[in-house]
Image (cartoon, rainbow, N blue to C red):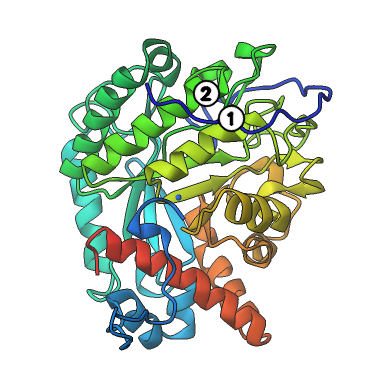
């Protein structure tokens, strides 16, 4: 088994009691509803200036770079909103045709392969041929499997897989990748990289209570996360690490509570971050931010809105330069007091890239907010273009452009 140098142990602090994601929750992972990424990959780079060839000449712009220059302000804004579609629901045409959403993710339980494939086909038909949608789903194994029945094979929970070791993880995530690829999807909103506090165990509702974590030892979890990412990549499926900087020490589920979601222990030098570092090194395409609060990183600010968490820690110290996305901001109680427009603009201000909403009816308001914010000045316009560039580069790396 590959060994990794663990991050230095942070000074001891009081641990938060932790809870799990409610099985009946509304979120994408995005709360881990079981009923219902410089990543080391090419998808980790943003569409920036053209590079130089070895002879000093300018390299030809990539497909993502060319497209970035051609998109309208609304198309750029739309790329930064990913929309959840519940099983049995139709995709509202305006989501992709008028608001130019960057893609969709599947919510709740999809038992029929045909239903998934029909939804995938509809998403592509509603989108511009030049701007295809990113298609994602929560598929972790165990209780959190949005694809079931003949849509995907059953796989064990992360807790069970972690106890067996990286080889078992690799086998399970290979099958997950095969099933997603067969349905026409490109992104798994997994694996969970959170390390569960051993003193909490099942009392950690978001992860431990639903058997979603690979374990309580940072190095063991890191090996399993890397195995999962590499297995997905082997099937052409992009992995999403979640929920940075970790939900293993919080009490309540951020989908259903704005209380008990503070982690006073996790800091910049915490060994519990090692699993995220391992996933990044293995080539994870995206990183999903937690909506919990981490006072040792930035007091009183949910991680998804924290520049200290995103720019300084995730990008600066861990070296991730791919798309950074939110957990659900559409139906989650943790952000219910934040005005809908700010749920998008605060992420962008903090250095993040795209919001996930489990409520499709919010799509237009979110895209409006991003488009208007980009018009406020050069810095805001630059940030939107930077994030859109990352999303387009991801699509190009997955063969969509």
Provide the secondary structure element on which disc 1 rests: loop
| Residue with the mark numbered 2 | 219
Percent of width and height locating residue 45: 42, 64
Q: How far apart are labels 1 and 2 at the CA level?
A: 7 Å
For residue 217, what is the image quadrant? Answer: top right
Which residue is depicted at the point 36% across and 87% down?
Answer: 70
Q: Is residue 384 left or right of residue 313?
A: left
The answer to which of 390 and 109 lies nearer the viewer is 390
Residue 327, above or below 392: above
Q: Is residue 334 visible?
A: yes
The answer to which of 239 and 226 lies nearer the viewer is 226
Q: Is residue 235 left or right of residue 170?
A: left
Q: Is residue 299 left or right of residue 32?
A: right
For residue 391, what is the image quadrant? Answer: bottom left
1 or 2: mark nearer the eye:
1
Locate the C terminus by quadrant.
bottom left
Instruction: Identify the disc placed on residue 379.
Output: none
**What residue occupies the far front of the structure in this picture?**
55
Residue 187, above or below 102: above
Provide the secondary structure element on which disc 2 rests: helix
Percent of width and height locating residue 277: 52, 40
Percent of width and height locating residue 227: 35, 30
| Residue with the mark numbered 1 | 6
- What is the crowding at mark 1: few (fewer than 14 residues within 10 Å), some, or many (at least 20)? some
Residue 65, above or below 331: below
Q: Is residue 34 visible?
A: no
- What is the crowding at mark 2: few (fewer than 14 residues within 10 Å), some, or many (at least 20)? many
């Amino acid at each position: 088994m590959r060994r990794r140098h663990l991050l230095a142990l942070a000074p001891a602090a009081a641990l938060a009691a932790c809870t799990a994601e409610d099985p009946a929750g509304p979120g994408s992972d995005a709360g881990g509803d079981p009923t219902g990424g410089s990543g080391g990959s090419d998808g980790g780079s943003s569409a920036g200036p053209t590079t130089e060839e070895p002879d000093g000449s300018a390299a030809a712009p990539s497909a993502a770079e060319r497209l970035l220059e051609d998109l309208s302000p609304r198309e750029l804004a739309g790329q930064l909103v990913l929309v959840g579609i519940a099983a049995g629901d139709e995709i509202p045409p305006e989501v992709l045709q008028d608001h130019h959403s960057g893609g969709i993710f599947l919510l709740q339980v999809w038992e029929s392969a045909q239903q998934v494939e029909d939804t995938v086909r509809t998403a592509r038909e509603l989108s511009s041929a030049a701007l295809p949608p990113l298609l994602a789903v929560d598929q972790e194994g165990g209780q959190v499997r949005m694809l079931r029945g003949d849509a995907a094979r059953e796989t064990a929970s992360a807790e069970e897989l972690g106890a067996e070791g990286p080889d078992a993880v690799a086998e399970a995530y290979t099958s997950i990748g095969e099933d997603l690829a067969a349905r026409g999807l490109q992104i798994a909103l997994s694996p969970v990289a959170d390390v569960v506090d051993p003193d909490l165990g099942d009392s950690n509702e978001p992860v431990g209570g639903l058997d979603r974590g690979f374990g309580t030892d940072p190095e063991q979890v890191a090996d399993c996360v890397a195995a999962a990412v590499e297995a997905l990549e082997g099937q052409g499926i992009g992995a999403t690490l979640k929920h940075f900087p970790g939900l293993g020490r919080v009490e309540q589920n951020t989908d259903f509570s704005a209380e008990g979601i503070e982690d006073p222990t996790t800091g910049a030098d915490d060994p519990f971050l090692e699993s995220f570092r391992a996933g990044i090194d293995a080539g994870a395409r995206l990183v999903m931010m937690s909506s919990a609060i981490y006072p040792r990183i930035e007091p009183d600010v949910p991680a998804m809105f924290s520049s200290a968490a995103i720019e300084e820690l995730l990008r600066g110290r861990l070296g991730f330069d791919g798309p950074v996305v939110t957990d659900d901001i559409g139906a989650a109680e943790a952000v219910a007091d934040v005005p809908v427009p700010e749920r998008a603009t605060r992420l962008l201000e903090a250095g993040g890239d795209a919001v996930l909403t489990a409520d499709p009816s919010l799509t237009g308001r979110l895209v409006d907010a991003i488009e208007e914010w980009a018009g406020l000045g050069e810095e805001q316009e630059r940030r939107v273009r930077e994030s859109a560039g990352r999303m387009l580069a991801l699509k190009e790396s997955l063969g969509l452009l």
